[in-house]
Amino acid sequence: MSRLLGVAVGVAAAGVACVGWGVAEAHAFTTRRVAVPVLEPGATPIRVLHVSDLHFTTSQRDKVAWASSLAKEAPDLVVVTGDNLGHPDAVPTVAEALAPLLGLPGLFVFGSNDYVGPRPVNPFAYFGGPSRIHADRTPLPTEDLRAVFVDAGWKDLNNARAVITVAGVEVTAVGMDDPHIGRDAMPAPDGDRGALHLGVVHAPYARALQALTDDDADIMFAGHTHGGQVCVPGFGALVTNCDLDRRRVKGLSSWPGALGDPESTWLHVSAGAGTSPYAPVRFACRPEATVLTLVAKA
């Protein structure tokens, strides 16, 4: 009996330690950097800051300071792939956090948590497939958030196309609203194709990635997965909360095949910088933003 009690106490202590680590790691913000050979030979590099899944509440001062500090990376373009809000009153917090970046060229799409607020969920439900949006979710001030970005000159890519000048280069972009809640609709072709063509979406569902690939995007940006949020060291993410495979849950990869496949497109999935306020932990998956330096192909 005493041996069983000792085992139980040890398991409980390990569980408490893991939760404590997960809470601490959720505040261990980091900035990742990667080079992507996507431009034509001789082209000048372009620095893209990819930010996703901030899930801001009104009290997260450390996250505000970190997000504001990203301006020191001196990006040429900011791409925000949704889920900015975690509370109905957090639009001013988002505006404050991103204020140093709003004067730069920017592109954005929304995620489900830019439309409706979070709610408590059973974490084991994610193993049954992508999460569902329930009718009792609190509506969020989506249009106030949109106004913050659009008034700053950022391009709204929710089921839309845009042309933007970045570091003296004409860039075209196409985006879709969040596939996770069925709001995605590929905009009709308009004939424009810049020196660089970007695809942007919140949740990297296969249908969305294939549509952007078919549109001849040079590189695609997505978020939503949180990198798995709670990962197993040496194994990685357990779930992606969409139909994307676990190998592509975060970081740079390609879709639909391997790197170098002429039918594939570069894909960057951000592990995001936040959590639901009802599950404020990350484990073996630090909150992040990424600076992608787009460079000339060899």
Image: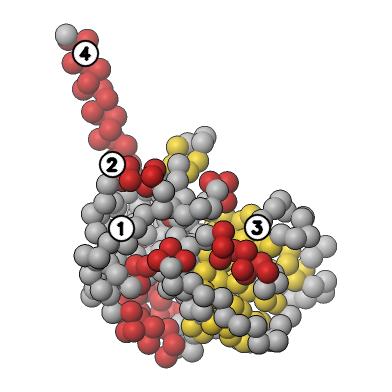
| 160 sits left or right of 6 in the view | right
* Residue shown at the point (32%, 42%) measured from the top left: 124
Query: For residue 4, which numbered disc appears in the image?
Result: 4
Q: Whole-Å distance between the Cαs marked 3 and 2?
A: 36 Å
| Between marks 4 and 2 in the image, the one whose residue lies nearer the viewer | 4
The quadrant holding residue 84 is: bottom left
Residue 293, given in percent of the width and then of the height, sits at: 65, 67
Residue 199's tag is: none
Return the residue at label 3.
255
Residues under numbered marks 1 and 4 in contact, where contact means CB atoms less than 8 Å apart: no
Residue 40 shows in this picture: yes
State the image coordinates of residue 19 (x, y, percent, origin top left): 29, 40
* Numbered label attached to residue 20: 2
> Crowdedness of circle 1 by 10 Å Cα count: few (<14), some, many (20+)?
many
Mark 3 vs mark 2: which is more N-terminal? 2
Image coordinates of residue 71 in percent, x first then y, are 49, 74
- Disc on the earlier residue, 3 or 4: 4
Of residues 291 and 245, the one drawn nearer to the viewer in this rendering: 245
Q: Which sits earlier in the primary sequence, circle 1 or circle 4?
A: 4
- SS for tag 1? loop
At 39% from the left and 43% from the top, the residue drawn is: 127
Closer to us: mark 2 or mark 1? 1
Q: Amino acid at mark 2?
A: Gly
| Residue highlighted by disc 1 | 276
Instruction: Determine the secondary structure under disc 4.
Output: helix
Tell me the distance, in whole angstroms, between the alpha carbons under discs 1 and 3: 28 Å
